[in-house]
């Protein structure tokens, strides 16, 4: 259950703090231990937010995107699917921040792969750029691991993630939705492959 936090009969301040209590585990054991549908319905009501989307809104959110194919490292694929689910469900800030985490790990993965193939000496010469994500993006571009276009996309996602990781940006619901949509479209452009490449990959797997 969620309710306003009251002090002396009035809200404590203009930020409208609320109390959240999770009593559902108790109810699962005592009220409907054998009714999965009731448990999930109660969970949905217990955790519903102001951004909760109706089924119609979820369908509309799905239609915000054109069909696409992407190729991702296996460790990133489930996280990318979570980004899509969060967008459709109205969890836009979480969507942006997770997308930023994926691309941050992706840049590290690119650098590690480069070291395995080319050695560490080029990176040692620019090791001051390893500390922060924005500098690591520059480093991968300097080493010709990513193109200028990819550098711009990764920088955009990084800047957006940094913006929404701070409290002042968390209340702007409409901007968050648009920024989440832009972030996903940029991720798709970063990892997109053509239908022909998909078919070639499938044929290659058949030959193994």
Image (tube, rainbow, N blue to C red):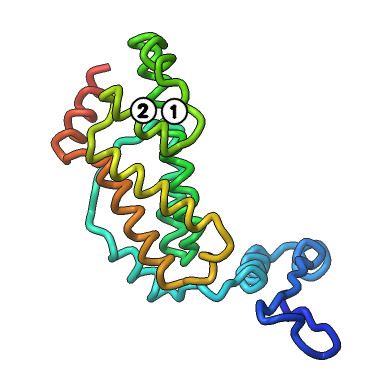
Locate the C terminus by quadrant: top left
In the image, 127 versus 44, the foreground residue is 127
x and y, in percent, of residue 95 in the image: 46, 55
Which residue is at the far left?
196
Q: Is residue 13 visible?
A: yes
Residue that label 1 marks: 129
Q: Are marks 2 and 1 in contact (CB under 8 Å)?
A: yes
Name the spot of residue 118 as percent of width and height, x first.
33, 10
Dot 1 falls on a residue whose secondary structure is helix
Residue 70 in view:
no
- Does 171 appear above or below 115? below
Residue in the picture at 35% in, 44% down: 155
CA neighbours of label 1 inside 10 A, class few (<14), some (14 to 19), many (20+) = some
Task: Please state the horizontal and vertical placement of residue 79, each as a whole percent of the image.
Answer: 46, 44
- Looking at this view, is 138 or 104 the one in front? 138
Q: Which label number is shown at residue 139?
A: 2
Q: Secondary structure beneath disc 2?
A: helix
Image quadrant occupied by the N terminus: bottom right
């Amino acid at each position: 259950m969620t309710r306003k936090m009251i002090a002396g009969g009035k809200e404590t301040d203009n930020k409208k703090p609320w109390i959240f209590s999770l009593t559902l585990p108790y109810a699962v054991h005592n009220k409907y231990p054998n009714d999965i549908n009731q448990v999930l319905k109660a969970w949905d009501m217990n955790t519903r937010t102001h951004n909760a989307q109706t089924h119609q809104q979820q369908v509309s959110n799905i239609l915000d995107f054109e069909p696409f194919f992407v190729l991702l490292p296996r460790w990133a694929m489930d996280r990318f699917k979570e980004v899509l689910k969060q967008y459709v469900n109205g969890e836009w800030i979480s969507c942006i921040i997770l997308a930023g985490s994926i691309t941050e790990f992706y840049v590290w993965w690119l650098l590690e792969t480069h070291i395995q193939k080319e050695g560490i000496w080029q990176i040692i010469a620019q090791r001051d750029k390893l500390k922060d994500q924005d500098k690591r993006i520059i480093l991968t571009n300097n080493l010709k691991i990513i193109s200028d276009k990819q550098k711009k996309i990764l920088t955009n996602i990084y800047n957006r993630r940094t913006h929404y990781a701070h409290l002042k940006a968390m209340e702007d619901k409409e901007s968050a939705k648009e920024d989440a949509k832009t972030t996903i479209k940029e991720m798709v452009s970063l990892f997109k492959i053509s239908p022909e490449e998909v078919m070639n990959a499938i044929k290659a797997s058949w030959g193994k």
